[in-house]
Amino acid sequence: MVRRCQVLAAARRRLGDEAGYSLVELLIIMFILLLVIGALADGFTSASRAEVDQTNRASDQQAARQALDRMRKDIHCATNARAPQILDGSGNPTDAWLLDLPISSGCLVDLPAGDSGVQWCTAPINGSTTRYGLYRTFETPSGTPCNAANADFQVDYITKSNLWTVPDCGAGVAAGQIKTVFVDLPVNRDYPKRPSRTYDLQDKIGLRNAGAC
């Protein structure tokens, strides 16, 4: 009995000697935990943003490739090509360009009856000078011009307005050769901050139905 009392007394003394955490120690521990949790949250956020950015870039590049494929078919079918700058209602040049492609009937499956060709055009998005949209429409006999209001949207985040170069016969195209349309299609949705990430599609497409120079 005495031995048991001595053991219990010793246990009480050990428990009494144990000190708990002070308020300062608790605050320090909480601060350290907040730092660790904040670092983990920042890592997850950065990874999520990177994934979204990669998805957006892949989507933009895919849209550009599809537009170039569609444009290539139109140019192959065209009997001629012009790439003038679009004028406003007063005849002044605007920050937009047009690719005019007269097409003979029967070459393009989707060319509606009565339309004389296809037009591609660019137009600035929200007045930007580094972000343009690309549009496609059919050219009616009345000559309705391609613009953002009446054409089908194709690609966003193009970084320049003039995408086409069409050399004339005798000015870069020798006799016996067919005329070509040079297409330069740069896409970058973050161009002002990261211009080096521009995805630039280029192609030289022959006017197969235009005949040789």
Image (spheres, grey):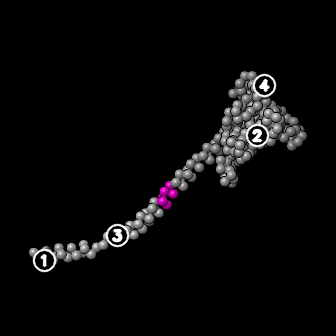
Q: Magenta segment range? A: 38-44
N-terminal-most mark, 1 or 3: 1
Question: Can you say which quadrant of the picture contains the N terminus?
Answer: bottom left
Give me the residue at 51% from left, 57% from top.
Answer: 42
* Residue on which disc 1 sits: 3
Q: Which amino acid does label 3 sit on?
A: Tyr
Q: Distance between the residues labelled 1 and 3?
A: 33 Å
Amino acid type of disc 2?
Ala
What amino acid is found at the position of numbered circle 4 in the picture?
Ser
Q: Does the magenta stretch include residue 141?
A: no
Q: How crowded is mark 2: few (under 14 residues within 10 Å), some or many (20 or more)?
A: many
Determine the secondary structure under disc 2.
strand
Pointer 2 residue: 96
Q: Mark 3 points at which residue?
A: 21
Mark on residue 142? Answer: 4
* Residue 47: numbered disc: none
The quarter of the picture where residue 60 lies is: top right
- The answer to whether residue 114 shows anywhere in this view is yes
**How far apart are labels 2 and 1 at the CA level?**
100 Å
Residues marked 1 and 3 touching at CB (< 8 Å): no
Residue 59 image position (x, y, % from top left) = 61, 43
